Amino acid sequence: MRLLIVGPPGAGKGTQATRIAERFGIPTISTGDIFRANIANETELGKRVKAIVDSGDYVPDSLTNELVSDRLSEADARGGFLLDGYPRTPEQVRYLDELLSAHGHKLDAVLRLVADQDEIVRRLRKRALEQGRADDSEEAIRHRQEVYRRETAPVLEMFREQGLLVEVDGLGTVDEVTERIWAAFDANGLQLPEQSA
């Protein structure tokens, strides 16, 4: 199963990604984790990423594509994966399509967690106060939500046109959202592996 998960910051993407990956027996591949791992291991790519990040710039598509391609070639990802945080741009979508089709594969679905912005802001403000993170002001949270919406809109449109988009309400308890995801996968003809007891 080759899947992608998208959703605004605070929609509970990480938690659901872990559950989906466990159920399908596939690795969750987060670009943030790839960047950190390459930087920590001081790989050639990692050194290039670190220089860019240290200067406060965004990692360009070409380098992000290279890192993702490298990660997808690892043994654990050959039978499938769940991508989180990639692709973020139309250019990255095209690259991923070409990369997968070169190996005779394609994405099975793009899961989008949909959540009301005001509810997310409330959730993140509460978490920030509980964890004493003063930098997570309502203004900062709303700004991140806006950047996410602006950046992902064209990418989501591409996936919608390809018939890959599966949208699920991301609000509610963790278990409620997970159940909605299984139901949506089922409704879209995606075969769910049996859950181990």
Image (spheres, rainbow, N blue to C red):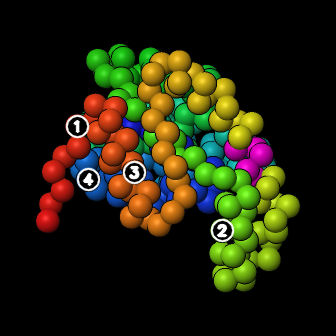
- Residue furthest out toward the right: 139
Q: Earlier in the sequence, mark 2 or mark 4?
A: 4
What is the number of the mark on residue 123? Answer: 2
Q: In 3D space, how far apart are the residues under numbered discs 3 and 4 (Cα atoms)? A: 14 Å
Residue 115 appears in the rendering: yes
- Is 129 on the left or on the right of 84, as rendered? right
How far apart are the alpha carbons under marks 1 and 3? 15 Å
Quickly name the residue at label 3.
180
x and y percentages locating residue 172 in the rendered image: 51, 63
* In the rendered image, the vertical position of residue 98 relative to residue 37, given as above or below: above
Above or below 167: residue 54: below
1 or 4: tag closer to the N-terminus: 4
Quadrant of the rendered image containing residue 166: top left
Q: Which residue is mark 1?
A: 191
- Nearer to us of marks 2 and 4 is 2
Whether residue 91 appears in magenta in the rendering, the answer is no
Point out which mark residue 23 bears. 4
- The stretch of residues the image draws in magenta is 144-148
In three-dimensional space, the C-alpha distance between marks 2 and 4, rounded to whole angstroms, equals 27 Å
